[in-house]
Image (tube, rainbow, N blue to C red):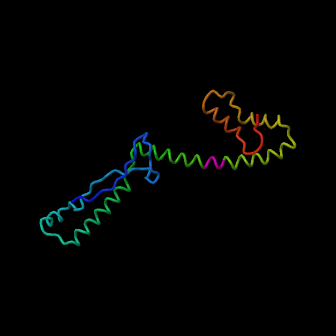
């Protein structure tokens, strides 16, 4: 007798709906026979079984199935989804850190503006963030991020 199996099916690329409550990594279906295949159980399989023994064997089979599902390695596609998800979480952390850093820079910069000219502050920015060109997407990204401000005017 084969027990019902639970599996999660991830939608194919481009599906419109993707419920957020689904786990990110799909576990493969496993078929585990709830009856042990050891020689001792084969000799008793022809005899009648007590209901307690069947329940115990089904319970043990569920434990084995649970163990196998927990320790299966994800496929390449699932690893990519997990890597993407982790990268988004990391990006969020970094954006929040960048926000705090930019606020600290602007606080100190406003005080420094009392002693330094705007030209001097602009030259310091250019010294640290000027990539000599915005030819590549990486250079354009860094240039754009370096000009972002929380409060006040943007450096040249």
Q: Position of residue 147 (x, y in %)?
A: 71, 37
Residue in the image at 26% along x and 57% along y: 32
Q: Which residues are magenta?
A: 93-97
Residue in the image at 52% along x and 48% along y: 86
Up-down: is 69 above or below 12? below
Q: Position of residue 45 (x, y in %)?
A: 15, 65
Q: Position of residue 140 (x, y in %)?
A: 64, 32
* Front position in the image: 122 or 71: 122
Quarter of the picture containing the C terminus is top right
Up-down: is 39 above or below 75? below
* Front position in the image: 75 or 155: 155
Instruction: Describe residue 61's horizontal placement relative to residue 27 as left or right.
Output: left
Up-down: is 98 above or below 134? below
Quarter of the picture containing the N terminus is bottom left
Instruction: Describe residue 102's horizontal placement relative to residue 41 as left or right.
Output: right
Magenta residues, dominant SS class: helix
């Amino acid at each position: 007798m084969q027990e019902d199996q639970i599996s999660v099916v991830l939608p194919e690329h481009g599906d419109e709906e993707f419920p957020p409550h689904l786990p990110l990594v799909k576990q493969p279906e496993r078929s585990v026979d709830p009856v042990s295949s050891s020689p001792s159980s084969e000799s008793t399989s022809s005899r009648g079984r007590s209901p307690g023994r069947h329940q115990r064997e089904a319970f043990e089979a569920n434990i084995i199935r649970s163990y196998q599902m927990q320790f299966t390695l994800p496929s390449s596609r699932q690893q990519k989804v997990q890597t993407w998800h982790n990268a988004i979480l990391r990006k969020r952390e970094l954006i929040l850190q960048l926000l705090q850093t930019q606020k600290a820079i602007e606080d100190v910069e406003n005080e420094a503006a009392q002693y330094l000219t705007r030209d001097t502050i602009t030259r310091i920015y250019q010294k640290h963030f000027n990539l000599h060109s915005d030819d590549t997407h990486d250079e354009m990204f860094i240039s754009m991020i370096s000009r972002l401000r929380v409060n006040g005017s943007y450096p040249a």
